[in-house]
Amino acid sequence: MTALETDFKPFKTRVEDALANRTLKVAIERTTGTARLKRAAAVSTWPNFAGARDLGRRIKDHVTSNLDHYLIEFERNAIASGAKVHWASTAEEACEIVVDICKAANAKSVTRSKSMLGEEIGLPLALEKAGITRVETDLAEHIVQLAGDKPSHIIWPALHRTREEVAELFRKHHHTPQNSDEIPAMVRSARRQLREAFLRADVGISGANFLIADSGAVCTVTNEGNAELTTTIPRVHIVTAGIEKLVPSLRHAMVLLRLLVRSATGADFTQYTTFHCGPKRPGDADGPEEFHIVLVDNGRTHMLGGDLNDMLRCLRCGACMNHCVVYRQIGGHAYGGTYPGPMGSVLTPELDGLAGSRDLVHACTLNGNCQQVCPVDIPLPTLLRGWREKSWNEGLEPRSVRRALWFWAFAARHPFLYRMATAVAVRVLRLFGEAGWVRSMPMAKGWTSHRDFPKPASRTFMEQYRAAQRRARK
Amino acid sequence: MTSRDLILGKVRRALHRDGVEPGPVTAIAESLLSEPELGRPPLPEGDLRSLFASRVTLPQIGGTVCVVEDLRDVPAAVRIYLEEHGTESPVALQPDPDLMQLDWGGLAFTSGISPDQTVAIQKALWGIAETGTLIFHSAPNCATLFSFLPLHHIVVLEAKHIVAYLEDYAVAAGHMAVPRNANLITGPSGTTDIEGSLARGAHGPGFLHIIIVDKRD
C-alpha cells in the first residue's frame, strides 16, 4: 500500500496500520535513533548552545516582527541581481506561476531539489497535470518518486523504506542498476541514473533554507550536491520559498545554519551550503540564464501576529519528530499532512483546516521533548494545546469526547466521587496485571494490542497519603 | 490588487503599521550580533591551518589533506594523489591564473569539464577552520560545476586564506561584489537517505583532496 492510498483513511485507521507494521517501526528507529544520538553529541560539544539557541530565536523573531521591511529589502536586492521576483498568496497561485515559467521556457523536463514548500503547495501534482516530466534529485525523494509514495520525514523523506525495498525499486526502474544490494552500490546506481536527468533538464526547481535580505541571495543546503546540479545546469532556475525564510544578512544566516544543521543531522555544517544570487553573469562559465524567485504566503500572514506567530520561526530541521514518542511509533504517513510530527501537527490544521485534522492535535503526550530540542525554542506543546481549545470551542470534538469530559469534570468537582472512582479503577486494572504490566485487557485492546500498560500501585495516591498520615499521627 | 500588495498589506495589518523606517530595523539586526561569540562554538586551541586540516579530515567529513611549501609543488602533489588512486584520465583544470602558470609536466588536461569527469582541480578562495569548509565564488574563470561533476575534487588552498569562523568569511565577502554562486563545501558528497547509513559520492564528488600551500614548513 502506498502513502497516497492511506490518505483517504481516517487517522485512527492510519495509526492502527502503522502500529501493526513492524518493519516500519524498525525503519523509523534506525534513522531517528541515529539522528538523536548525533544531535546530542553535536550539541554537547558546544558549551553555550543554549545561548546560541536563544540568539537564533531572537533573530527569527526580529525578522517576523519586521517582515514587511525584509520582504521589500530582499525583493529590491534580488531584482538588482537580475532575478525575477514573483509573489503568490496561495498554493494554487504559486503552482500556476511555476508552471507558467516552465511553459514559457518550453520545458519538457524539470529537475527538483528537495523542498518541503514545494510539497506544501502541491507542486509535484501541478507539474504532472501540466504534462511536465519531473525528476526528484534528492536520493530520498527519488526513492519516494519511484515508489509512488509521499515523504514521511522532512529530512529523510524515505526513512520508511528498507534497503531491500530500495534495491528492488532501483532494479525495476534504473537503466543500469546495481549488481549488489550494498548501499554504496545502490547510491552509485542512482548517481548514474540521475546524472542523465540533470543534463537533460530544461528547468531546475529548488526551495530555499534562507533568503538573505541584504544581498537578495537564496541559500540552499544539501549533503549530496543535488541542489547545485539542479540549479546550475538547466537554462532556468526557479526558487519557491515561504516568506518566513528571510534573514537580515549572511552573518545572521551563519548563526541559524549552525543551529539548523546540528539539530537536523547532528553534523556541524552541511556538505554543500550555497548562496544563489541572480542568473548567469556576462562571461560566467555556467549558471542559469533565468533566475526566478516565487515568494509564497499560503497562510503565513495569517499566522503572523496571531496564536501561531512562534511557528514562523521554524527552520524545518525535523528534530521535533526525531524526538517525538508519537512520531517514533507511527511514522510520518499516519499524520496525513505535508509536515509530520509535532511541527506538522501544529501546521496542518492551519494549512488544511482544523476540522479534518483535529485528531493530530490530540496525538500528543505533551511531554515537551519537541520544544526542548527545537533549535529556535518553538513552544510546540503550547501551540497544540491552543488547537485543542479551539477544536473544543468550535464544537469539533465528537459527542463521545464531550460526554466523557463532562463526566470527568463532574467527578472532578465532587472529590468523594472522584476518589471512589479512581480507587475502583486501580483495583480493576490490577486484576489484569501480570509481573508489573497489563498486557491485555477487554475494552482497551486499542491500547494493549500494540503496547503494555504499567500495572498500577495497589492503592491510589490519596489512599496511600491518608494511610501515611494516620501512621504519622499514631 | 497584485499578490504583492495583498501580502504586504496583510503583513502590515498583522504588525499594526503602515510602513517602516529601515534605519532602526537595520540597527536592531546589527545589535543582535554585537556579541559574535554567542552565535558560534569556541574554537579549540591551535593554529588555523592545523585546525582546518584536523577538522576536514574527521571521518564524518571525509576530506584528505596534504601540505606543500610552495604553489610550485602542487603539480607533484597532484601526481602523487592520482597515482595513489590509480587514475590516468585527463584532468579538468580551473582556468585560474595561479594554477595555469604552474609546470604540470606531462599531465593531460580536458578542455572543459564533462558530465563524467574523473578529476577536477580548483583553487579555493578561503578555508574556514571552524567547520573545515572551502569557499568558491562563481566567475568567468571559476565554473561552479568544477566542484560538483567530478568524482575526485582536488582543491588548492593557500594557508594564508584560512579564516577562523564562518562570519570571518561573511565579513571578507562583504567587501566584494556578491557572486552569482557562493559555494561553501565541507567534505565530499554524502547521503544517509537509505537506512541512515552514510554513503559517499551521492551526486557530487566521492573524494575531496585538499592541497594546503603553506610557506611556513
Image: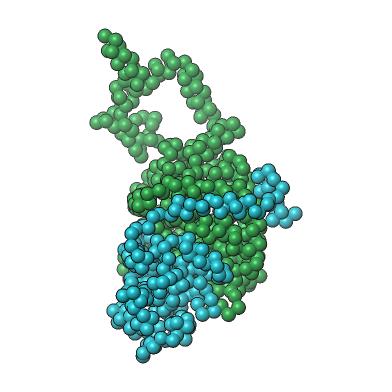
Q: Does residue B10 appear to the left or right of B48 in the view shown?
A: right
Q: Name, please, the residue furthest toward the front.
A: B216
Residue A424 percent across, percent down from the top left: 36, 19
Q: Give the position of the C terminus of chain A as an image quadrant.
A: top left
Q: In this view of the protein, can residue A100 be seen by the observer?
A: yes
In the rendered image, the vertical position of residue A363 relative to residue A86, given as above or below = above
In the rendered image, the vertical position of residue A285 relative to residue A122, given as above or below = below
- For the point 43% across and 66% down, the residue is B163
- For the point 51% across and 58% down, the residue is A251
Q: Does residue A439 appear to the left or right of B169 in the view shown?
A: left
Q: In this view of the protein, can residue A276 be seen by the observer?
A: no
- For the point 59% across and 75% down, the residue is A281
Number of numbered discs on residues: 0
Q: Name, please, the residue furthest toward the bottom.
A: B106
Foreground residue among A179 and A445: A179
In the rendered image, the vertical position of residue A470 relative to residue B73, given as above or below = above
- For the point 48% across and 68% down, the residue is B183
Q: Does residue B145 appear to the left or right of A98 in the view shown?
A: left
Residue A84 percent across, percent down from the top left: 65, 66
Q: Name, please, the residue furthest toward the left.
A: A435
Residue A193 percent across, percent down from the top left: 44, 71
Foreground residue among A432 and B199: B199
Foreground residue among A418 and B1: B1
Q: Which chain is cyan?
A: B
Residue A386 percent across, percent down from the top left: 54, 36
Q: Colour of chain A?
A: green
